[in-house]
Image (cartoon, rainbow, N blue to C red):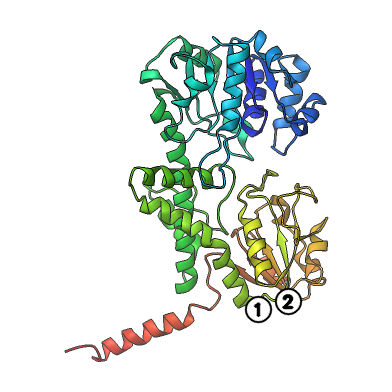
Amino acid sequence: MHVSIIGAGYVGLVTGAGLARLGHAVSLVEINPARLGPLLEGRVPFHEPGLQELLSAGLASGTLRATGDVGEALAAAELVMVCVGTPLRDDGDADLSQVAAACRDIARHAPSLPVVVRSTLPLGSTVHLAEWLGRPDLSGVLTNPEFLRQGSAVADFLKPTRIVVGCVGGADSAAVAQVRSLFAQLDAPFMVTDFASAEMIKNAANAFLATKLSFINEVADLCEAYGASVDDVVRGIGLDPRIGASYLRPGIGFGGSCLPKELANMVRLGRAHELQMPLMTGAAITNEERPARVADRLERMLGSLAGSRVALLGLTFKPHTDDTRYSPAIALSEELLRRGATVVAHDPVLRLDAETVPAAVERATNVAGAVSGADLIVLATEWPDYLDLDWAGLAGTARRTLLYDGRGVLDRDAAERAGWTVARVGIGDGAHSEVLEAAAGSREGSRNGADGP
């Protein structure tokens, strides 16, 4: 099939390169010069493992090409996919201007072409597509929400957990058959539903994952306060098949382009119908408060953050990506700066001049440069590069050998043998002792009849 894809960002480029791998002829349309330029040179304009190989293979075979000309790309297409961004505006609403612009381009150049919207749409927004496309109805329009995780997007495309299609009435049609054909080589459940349900599946899935992450972060706080090990707790509750261990990893918070955005959207849209959404609201608040809570613990370790030098290892919101959107590491750096700390950061792939990093954050070209003269080291993003560091060598360059593992992934014993004092998310550092002693005293008094009749 000849497919045109409008938007060559994380979703569009992975989708296009993946479809080319499946043998389809794909034209990628990108109007952003910062992305189009590298694509025309055969380079992926962002970091995503495995994508460069997929892109290079598609370009070499002739099944994939990139262009900035929408009309040219749509001229021979049998189907067009919309894969542009839908970021949150300052007022909390999703910005659908890129989707509207793409639809208007389709209306101008290929008014009868089947359209598949792969961009994440907030609940209730599909109704606008007919207006933007200039069509009387949505009979030739489908939604196909993506479930690609940054850092493993190529594998997620080629081995999807499910393929969801939203359409008028939730019934099979000629357009649905085209999408079935498009993904026929992929072994995954194929689900056809109505537009509203397709939107809800995507938004609810991410909102649930965000809620699960906030839940385990609150459990980690309780573990720190009462002397429990969050690692053992996660193992213990994760063995229950009704719960599962996935997304039960405590840390300094969650971020990225999907989870925070869709959680906020669900809350906002619920309140528009006088639904208070207390569970999702609480999950969002827990995540928003995470940087301050982590900074409180760091302050206990140091005595005061004011005047301290903190080395931050990792700035992206997760490993294997250069994306810093809603990054908890960035949020933590801002909180540390507010409390008077000097912050010097290192990240394996992020550009030193990345605009999303606060200007006051100093950047180091290597870990040793970040750690040199530091009072405290904080692991903020669990890059593999940080899992086997020379802790003995680094100890000789730091001013104080204090280490906070904000992701719970470091070899604590190895670091402590090298002379570091290590604190870890979800593991108490002595702050719980008074609580335990008070509880023990209460139990002893009860056994002695102090609370008896």
Residue 62 is situated, as x and y percent measured from the top left of the image, at 75, 14
Residue 307 is marked as 2
Instruction: Give the SS element for disc 1.
Output: loop
Q: Disc 1 marks which amino acid?
A: Ser
Seen in the picture, residue 284 relative to 172 is either above or below; the reply is below
The residue lying at 46 percent from left, 83 percent from top is: 434
| Outermost left residue | 453
Q: Is residue 411 visible?
A: no
The residue lying at 75 percent from left, 59 percent from top is: 345
Seen in the picture, residue 349 relative to 163 is either above or below; the reply is below
Residue, disc 1 = 304
Q: Nearer the viewer, residue 18 or 332?
A: 332
Q: Residue 189's image quarter? A: top left
The residue lying at 66 percent from left, 68 percent from top is: 338
Residue 224 is situated, as x and y percent measured from the top left of the image, at 50, 70
Tag 2 and tag 1, C-beta contact below 8 Å: yes
Residue 206 is situated, as x and y percent measured from the top left of the image, at 48, 42
Tell me: 63 left or right of 237. right
Rate crowding at label 1 as few (under 14), some (14 to 19) or many (20 or more) other CA atoms within 10 Å: some
Rate crowding at label 2 as few (under 14), some (14 to 19) or many (20 or more) other CA atoms within 10 Å: few
Q: Is residue 415 visible?
A: yes
Q: Disc 2 marks which amino acid?
A: Gly
Residue 383 is marked as none
Residue 120 is situated, as x and y percent measured from the top left of the image, at 52, 33
Work out how far the residue at label 2 is from the one at label 1, CA to CA, in angstroms. Answer: 8 Å
| Quarter of the C terminus within the rendering | bottom left
Seen in the picture, residue 73 relative to 351 is either above or below; the reply is above
Instruction: Give the SS element for disc 2.
Output: loop
| Quarter of the N terminus within the rendering | top right
